[in-house]
Image (spheres, coloured by chain):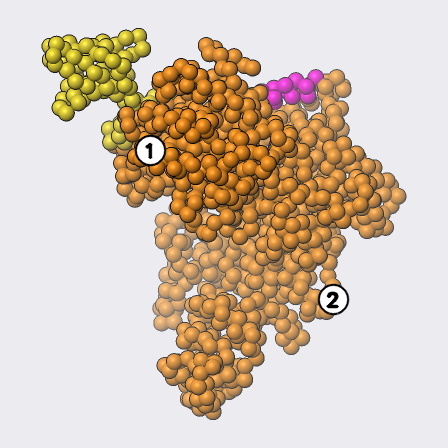
Chain colours: A yellow, B orange
Amino acid sequence: MIQVDESVAVVTNHDGQPISIDWRGSSYLASGAPVRWYARKSWWTEAGHAPKGIGPQLVETEMWRVRAHHESDGGVFELRHNLPEDEWKLVRII
Amino acid sequence: MEVGANNLVTGFAHLNFASAYSAHYGVNKPKQAVEFAKSLGFDALAIVDRDGLYGAVKHIGSCIENKIDPIVGVNLEVTDGISLGRVVILAHGHNRGAGWSSISRIISKAHQKKKNQSPSIARSELAELSQQEMANCTVLLGADSDVGQALLLDPARASRLADEWLNYFNTRGSLAIEVFTHLTEPGSKYSVEHARSLVSIAEYKKIPAVLTNAARYLQPDDALTADVLDSARYLEPLGIFLPQPNAQAWLKPAADMFSLALEITQQTRLAKKLISTTEQLVDRCRLDPVEDCDWGNPKTPERSLLGIEGNPFEVLWQKTHSAINSRYPDAKPSLVTEVQHQLSKELITINKLGFATFFLTVADVAQMIRDMRIRIAARGSGAGSLVNYLLGISHIDPISQGLLFERFLSTERSTLPDIDIDVESARRHDIYRSIFKRYGGDRVTLLSMQSTYRGRGAIRDSGMALGLDEDQIDQIAKSSWRFSAAGFRAALEMKPELARVASQVEKNRKLNLLVDLTQRLDRLPRHISMHPCGVILGDSRLLQLTPTEPSGLGLPMSQFDKDDMDPMGFLKLDVLGVRMQSTMAYAVREIERIESKQLDLDSVPTDDKDVFELIRTTNTLGIFQIESPGQRELTGKHQPTEFNDLTLQISLFRPGPMKGNMISPYLDGRHGFIQPDYFHPDLKPILEQSYGIVVFHEQLMKIMKVMTGCTLAKADELRRQMANPEASEKIQSYFKQSAIARGYQISVVNRVWKVLEGFGSFGFCKAHGAAFAFPTYQSAWLKTHYPAEFIAGLLTHDPGMYPKRLLLAEARRLGVYLLPIDVNKSTDEYRVELNKSEKAVRMALTEVAGISAPEVSRIIKYAPFIDLADFYKKARPSRKTITRLAALGALDSLAANATRGDLMQKIREITTKPAPRVNSTQQELNFNVVETLPTGNPQISTDEQIDYEVGLTGMDITGHLLDKYQPMLDSLGVSRANELSTLRGNTEVLIAGVRVATQTPPMKSGKRVVFISLDDSTGCADATFFDEAQKECADLLFNNRLLLISGKLRRTGKKGVSVLAENAWDLNRLWIKWERGERLAG
């Protein structure tokens, strides 16, 4: 397992599933069905506002596990999808 | 079936939603949830609160309103030696209440625990209560059950655990697997895999599986509120405990649920099966409120329990008619006709509404209370009913007092009326127990209430969740008592006194967050507790219709609150404990004991001149409702002469009329300073009693009736709606059109409407006022005719706002002699004794500081004592107690001719040895105390005696604290409180006394005004310190007991006076100077 924590460019299909990940100049293509889950955030240590209606992004963040390959390189990529910025981070490779 | 905007829901519904009534867990109230579910197109919704049906009635009510089917369940912990985790239990519907009653009994059983044990039910009991011949409930084993938990670690064990459940739950439909996922990290609890394993075990064991979302809020945004509630539940800041995994526990639309089914099962066939099994269970659990919960159908104890045979209405007719003679003795024929006419009118309404048994039930309880020889009085609008008067529920004659039945009950409203009864506070719990005994524990429970988050509580719990410093939270919470949590941020911007907090909030991230969290918690239920006075009475099915849990009293309490009573058709009685009732009951018992005669306080004439004479002196200390400084001042100005004046005075002295400046025009009219304005001759009979001012709801109703021609019942409906601005608009046009049609001038109509419109917040129900005025009159009657017994009652039951020593001063003023504490004569109550054929009050033992209840009861048990040794052996007082008793002179009767000093010395000697035990051989130690009492010690002086009394009982008993200063006061020319009313206005005066009350009411100007009441043994003198006068002496006003005040006399009415203060001094310091012969300055 390699901890990465870097911003990456991700292309998604119309269901929001990642289909390719651009990381350090290489494009990794997803294979198989990616898995999505939601991880918790500790909003009380970061947020300055939590008015009603702000949405779930203070509490949780969307996570993906995608099997992806570039030529012979590859593995299971764990991605964090930050909303509402729509920013992707590669957390680690398993 | 309703169709949503984009989705067609075909019978699928959420079977597991926890409402905000799952305290510190759920986020949304049932009404919100039902409306949300409806907007998503669902045709049913289940409420599944933790440990109870706390939100169930509100849920059903909202479902009926929104035309969807209610489903009710509970989330409970199950045990079998060890905890088996939490499960959901859903009641089946359309089975004539079998499901509802099963779930009620399951919950009641789960709450039958020792104190501080959380509710849970044994699996065997759950199995027994949820299945008879067939299943009445379905138990759902989900991720939090033992099976669900084991699936994560040890699937083989999960299989064995499932078999155990199957052993207990073998009827069809009694058990199901609850499948849900909150889309957590793969492999963890609540993950898709976890849900998938639940589907697999259901398939393998052939247990039906249903899909839910185990929802605890409606929308993802609410998850943040849930975090704060979790913190309040765990009593730990966020970050310390394991929080909810994410924000997925929301009420997802059907389409999302169907996708989840696919994601979990990964097979269309299994997903379809999961959904269709869910739909089947949904159908089985749809409740029919009427058939299953007996919704809205009034329930009363069975007739046989009320001693009724035959038609209840006929019984009511009989009972009320036969009471006319005793309630209206010697009435003129015209009055009898009026009474009969009114009675028929009321009986017709009661019969139409089908409430005859209800009235007979309340009458039965009232009779039971009277049979216990406990005082009872009706409070509130119920006093407006002649039926209540004739049944002995109320003691106020509604006809002579001009009260209206329609204000209490009418066919325009069909809800069970509230009849509130006041009883002696000291006997309230006895009454509860007797009600349980009389009607049986299966027909009675106490009422509960839900307290909700308001400003302070919300700030405290939000602050704790954020881990803020406790002092800091405290400081903010304290400064925030005038607004709701929801308005916190707005208040920060608006209120100048919050400027400091506001600037902190700007700079501090966490404080800023605190404001948002506080607003999120606003109005959410916090916890359930016993309602202070409500009792629910039902028939033998009561415990099948409501779950109960233990109350602090040990008696069972319903999980439903007062708002749930009407929908459930439960009869709620408010039995309110009132200390003044205990006081009066005690006084009456003392009168009967001392004078050996019977006294019926409820039937003394209400036009006794001497009573009003006493009230007019403003010496109203101890009299119900009119003893406060403000009421005393008003009494001086008002000078009441009859019962109705008391009703008016009590109704006027409230924040509404005071703010609306209604009191001055009323008084001006009364004293003839202005000509009352009656608007129109037709209104004169209605408004004459209050000099043209509309004081009572009843007056408004009558004006409506006269000017529009509507019925009184309709008039009351209109009155109720007037608070709503939209409705008020409609009522205005109705009023004006009808009045003009009836020939009233437009200018009159407009003027009257203006008054009626502004009346809303000021008006008072006259029946309430009269119900309050009755004990006011009764207590004044006792004070007038039996001052000793009344003072004894006041001292024993302490109903008022003043310290007891002021009551002693009042006793002295009334010429009631006070007898010191004496172990041979005192008890735990203030007894009236004949002292040289004069009535006197003996002080009670309980006033000695630090004396214990067992010491008091031993003294009462073994009294009288022969001598000190006898007392010491039998009463076994602690060293502190015997020393204090001796110092107070309570042992003087054991000391023959010895001085107090001698006695104290002896006690010091004997208490250095251990106290003798009754059964030990030490008892044989023969010391004849009297013979060996030392001699030569001085007798105690009166001043010393008073100092001891104040120190040890807080009261000056032997004399007044001011007595010793009298020579100085005389030489200074200080006026006595009772002389002030004879002096001219603007006279320069000096007053002195013990400070008994200090008030600093909030003023519009923002400047502080201090009101001080001084007691000088002749009465109370009131002084007012404005800004200027406070400069010299502000400290004294709050800290000193004995004060001398200079100022100008101000007359506030015929008998009312107060001192406009200029300066104040510490009486003790003056005394020291005076004794030294120094000149006193000023």
Residue drawn at x 61%, y 58% as measured from the top left: B583
> Regarding mark 1 in the picture, which secondary structure is present there?
helix
Task: Give me the C-alpha separation between circle 2 and circle 1.
Answer: 82 Å
Q: Which residues are magenta?
A: B725-737
Query: Residue B113: percent from the left, percent from the top?
Result: 47, 49
Position of B194 compared to B422: left or right?
Answer: left
Residue at image mark 2: B597
Position of B794 compared to B506: left or right?
Answer: right
Q: Chain of mark 2?
A: B
Position of B1026 compared to A31: left or right?
Answer: right
N-term-proximal mark, 2 vs 1: 1
Residue drawn at x 48%, y 22% as measured from the top left: B277
Tell me the quadrant of the picture where the N terminus of chain B can be found.
Answer: top right
> Regarding mark 2 in the picture, which secondary structure is present there?
loop
Figure check: B292 above or below B629? above
Rendered image: mark on residue B808: none
Tell me the quadrant of the picture where the C terminus of chain B can be found.
Answer: bottom left
Name the residue nearer the viewer: B24 or B950.
Answer: B24
